[in-house]
Image: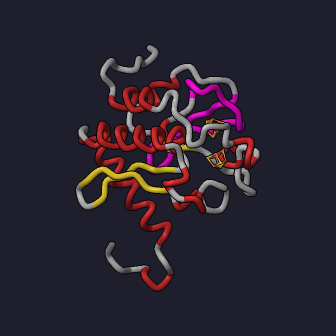
Amino acid sequence: MKKEVPAGCPVLAARALLDKVTPLNRDCGALCGAACCQADEDGRGGMLLYPGEENCYADLPAGFSLREVPEGMLLTCKGACERHTRPLACRVFPLVMTVMDNRPGVMLDPRAWPLCPLMPSGIQGLRRDFVEKVHQAAELLSAHPRQRAFLERQQRLISAYTQTPWQEGKKR
Ligand code: SF4
Ligand code: SF4
């Protein structure tokens, strides 16, 4: 039987907050050839879904695929999508939502540095309403234990990504 997205699902609410806002007034994909939608040189790509978000993909849009990985459910695409099918991770990029020091937070995703031309301008370079909605989504998600645990895990992944070799083994 097909799984329905439950009404009141926090991921749906967070996705809805980010339905209409974008990082810039113009299509930022035109600046970079939609670099964040392309697979890397090893042909890898994909977005980790928030807990329960996979239920939004019971009917997979053309070009999408879904698989389980150790970190959760990974959605991959062919580099083009309609906005309403876009996962939360893409809706907030180049920002990322986390929980740090027990508080929900929003930061530039350090994994965006190699590809996103918006990074050097910092958060101040992004549309204010976009940043505000991402903050609201982080607050909303962090109120739900399963989502909060995901945000905490996301913070740990980012910490590991930005860790310098001489910090390896240190507790963060
Ligand atoms: S890489 Fe950055 S500028 Fe390019 S489409 Fe993605 S978010 Fe926009
Ligand atoms: S789902 Fe859409 S926005 Fe996200 S990487 Fe694929 S094409 Fe780009």
Q: Is residue 169 left or right of residue 86?
A: left
Above or below for 80 versus 102: above
Residue at the (64%, 25%) spot, across then down: 82
Task: Count how many numbered circles sit on residues in the image.
Answer: 0
Task: Look at 33% across and 26% down and name the residue there.
Answer: 9
Q: Position of residue 62 (x, y in %)?
A: 68, 24
Where is residue 55 shown, x and y percent of the image?
Answer: 45, 25
Q: Is residue 79 magenta?
A: yes
Q: In this picture, is 88 found above or below 7?
A: below
| Residue 73 shows up from this direction | no
Q: Nearer the viewer, residue 163 or 91?
A: 91
Q: What colour scheme does the image use?
A: secondary structure
Residue 160 placement (x, y as % from top left): 45, 67
Q: Is residue 64 above or below residue 143?
A: above
Depth order, front residue of 77/102: 102
Q: Which residues are magenta?
A: 63-85
Q: Tell me if residue 62 is in the magenta stretch.
A: no
Q: Residue 146, can we see it?
A: yes
Q: Residue at x 50, y 27 (%)?
A: 19
Q: Nearer the viewer, residue 72 or 166?
A: 166
Q: Quadrant of the C terminus?
A: bottom left
Q: Residue furthest bottom?
A: 166
Q: Is residue 43 left or right of residue 6?
A: right
Q: Quadrant of the N terminus?
A: top left
> On screen, 7 above or below 152?
above
Write the residue at 38% across / 80% down: 169
Horizontal side of residue 56 vs 32, given as left or right: left
